[in-house]
């Protein structure tokens, strides 16, 4: 009788918040309860996996060497948390890169540039047998992020996973009932060969949704199943962990109400499909108000094998009570696709600076080109990771763009100014999704649009720069000292040089981005660390020693 009453009470609850309060562990019953963070080890090692029915060795992450997975474990914490992620390199497979480095995509790293991850910009790669403690705070961000290797094209070999910073319970005003690990949807491309032996810009073999999928000509491998209960509302966190393709994402029979873009809440926008580019994220509310059944979830790539024959590019939305069977639903024509110019932030609407084209404090045009020799240039310079990370160059006293390497690829930006970047589209490999570290930016002109919106443009951290004729324009304020890379998130293009670095507020980097003392390249504990501004260290030799302990010397 008691249990019956308990069940009745549970079923009558109007809202089931999966993350009601601290501590961080969610209640049992989610699809996965393997989330880690804000303090955890993250072991990087090799394992043979078969996510689409084809066996291959991969570069994977796990809380331990025995829990490696694709995607990697969800890293989770609350806004305000101090993250201490100790990345331990146990890679052994010589067909792929054995060193590594992790970027926490979308996290601003204010005051902790050394934890940002891009090799050659903020650190050298972590070598096999060593570890590196990523020690950073997330004081003012809540939303959907992800993490991935930022060493050449290593994340294409598997090192990618979701990162969620939750709002505190008291902040919540949810338009949804469920938000837990079962509502994270990763979509990405998958390759049957190791990235270092593939063509410079290879074609993916399959699309994986939540780490499962099928390839053309392959077996009917298990597809991801997303379970829902009728008449509940779900906050799905859609994360593109793609190396290359963008995907048109949709769920048969259902609309999606977008409420968050790249970690920033937006005015709710109802759509029937979302074209999501590499590195982008969308939270959308799905009301499971259709008849109990199975429905196809679709992610159609722009390159590689498109369509849905044999269950490729697909996963399954399964209502509780539906048969254990593949859906028989079909896709209606899209009449309400997501259009970027229809997205607006929920708060802090306006773009910074004077509301006129070219009227920011600093205006920079970035011309992307692809040369016959097979490399990309930005304003005629190709980015190759320097042997001395830009962060160490700055801490060592380099002050001007002319002094900073790689030559022609580093732009110095003054502090507390409004920056406008315009980036014409249409170069080879279009459309390029451009990502800026250290900031979110206002997209005052989107791909496919010729109008400028300074009033309430979407803020995000990856933007598609579109086709010939486009001139995507973004604005941000230089309130975060550090060297921040801007690059194409098609990983193959980044490797071919499609990057620049903004050295922001150069004079303040050494004092505002102190390197944590007590860290060593073989750090194995995850305690909080004392910090001393590097400017307090007067001896250049001592600075060099400190930098060496942080893997910051020669890459
Ligand atoms: Cu690109």
Image (spheres, grey):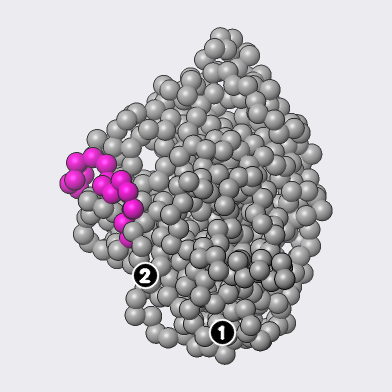
Residue 118, image x, y percentages = 56, 42
Judged from the image, the secondary structure of the residue bearing numbered disc 2 is: strand
Residue 327, image x, y percentages = 59, 86
Left or right, residue 38 beside residue 279: right
**Quarter the N terminus occupies:** bottom right
- Residue corresponding to mark 1: 292
Q: Residues within 10 Å of mark 2 (few under 14, many from 20)?
A: some
Residue 162, picture quadrant: bottom right
Can you name the residue that lies furthest to the bottom here? 328
Could you tell me how many numbered marks the image carries? 2
* Above or below, 396 relative to 279: above
User: What is the span of residues highlighted in magenta in the rendered image?
Assistant: 343-359
Residue 183 visible from this viewpoint: yes
* Above or below, 464 relative to 310: above
Of the numbered discs 1 and 2, the one sitting upstream in the chain is: 2
392, 406: nearer the viewer: 392
Query: Mark 1 against mark 2, which lies toward the viewer?
Result: 1
The residue at the point 36 percent across, 62 percent down is 268
Residue 542, image x, y percentages = 63, 14
Q: Residues within 10 Å of mark 1 (few under 14, many from 20)?
A: some
- Residue corresponding to mark 2: 270
The residue at the point 49 percent across, 69 percent down is 233
**Quarter the C terminus occupies:** top right
Specify whether tag 1 is near ligand 1 (CB below 8 Å): no
* Above or below, 262 relative to 553: below
């Amino acid at each position: 009788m008691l249990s019956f009453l308990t069940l009745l009470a549970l079923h009558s609850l109007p809202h089931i918040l999966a993350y009601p309060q601290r501590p961080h562990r969610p209640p049992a019953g989610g699809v996965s309860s393997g989330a880690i963070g804000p303090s955890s080890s993250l072991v990087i090692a090799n394992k043979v996996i078969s996510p689409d029915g084809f066996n291959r060795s991969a570069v994977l992450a796990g809380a331990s060497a025995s829990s490696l997975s694709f995607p990697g474990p969800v890293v989770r914490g609350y806004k305000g948390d101090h993250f201490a992620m100790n990345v331990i390199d146990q890679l052994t497979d010589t067909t792929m890169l054995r060193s590594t480095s992790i970027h926490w995509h979308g996290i601003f790293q204010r005051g902790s540039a050394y934890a940002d991850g891009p090799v050659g910009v903020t650190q050298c790669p972590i070598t096999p047998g060593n570890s590196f403690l990523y020690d950073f705070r997330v004081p003012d961000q809540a939303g959907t992020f992800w993490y991935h290797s930022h060493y050449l094209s290593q994340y294409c070999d598997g090192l990618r996973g979701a990162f969620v910073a939750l709002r505190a319970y008291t902040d919540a005003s949810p338009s949804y009932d469920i938000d837990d690990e079962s509502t994270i949807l990763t979509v990405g491309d998958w390759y049957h060969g190791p990235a270092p032996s593939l063509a410079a810009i290879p074609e993916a073999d399959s699309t994986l949704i939540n780490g499962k999928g099928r390839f053309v000509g392959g077996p009917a491998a298990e597809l991801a199943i997303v379970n829902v209960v009728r008449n509940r509302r779900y906050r799905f966190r859609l994360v593109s962990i793609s190396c290359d393709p963008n995907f048109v994402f949709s769920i048969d029979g259902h609309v999606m109400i977008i409420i968050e873009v790249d970690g920033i809440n937006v005015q709710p926008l109802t759509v029937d499909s979302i074209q999501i580019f590499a590195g982008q994220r969308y939270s959308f509310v799905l009301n499971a108000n259709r008849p109990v059944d199975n429905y196809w979830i679709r992610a159609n790539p722009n390159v590689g094998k498109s369509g849905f024959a044999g269950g490729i590019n697909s996963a399954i939305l399964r209502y509780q009570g539906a048969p254990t069977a593949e859906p028989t639903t079909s896709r209606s024509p899209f009449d309400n696709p997501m259009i970027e110019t229809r997205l607006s932030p929920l708060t802090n609407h306006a773009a910074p600076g004077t509301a006129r084209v070219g009227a920011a404090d600093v205006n920079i045009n970035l011309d992307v080109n692809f040369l016959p020799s097979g490399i990309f240039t930005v304003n005629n310079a190709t980015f190759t990771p320097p042997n001395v990370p830009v962060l160490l160059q700055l801490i060592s006293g380099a002050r001007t763009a002319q002094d900073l390497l790689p030559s022609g690829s580093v732009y110095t930006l003054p502090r507390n100014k409004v920056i406008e970047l315009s980036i014409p589209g249409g170069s080879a490999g279009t459309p390029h999704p451009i990502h800026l570290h250290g900031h979110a930016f206002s997209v005052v002109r989107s791909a496919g649009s010729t109008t400028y919106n300074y009033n309430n443009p979407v803020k995000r951290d990856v933007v598609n720069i579109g086709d010939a004729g486009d001139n995507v324009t973004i604005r941000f304020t230089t309130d975060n000292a550090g060297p921040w890379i801007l690059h194409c998130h098609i990983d193959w293009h980044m490797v071919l040089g499609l990057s620049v670095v903004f050295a922001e507020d150069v004079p303040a980097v050494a004092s505002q981005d102190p390197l944590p003392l007590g860290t060593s390249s073989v750090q194995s504990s995850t305690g909080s660390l004392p910090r001393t501004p590097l400017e307090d260290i007067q001896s250049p030799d001592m600075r060099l020693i400190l930098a060496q302990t942080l893997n910051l010397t020669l890459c």
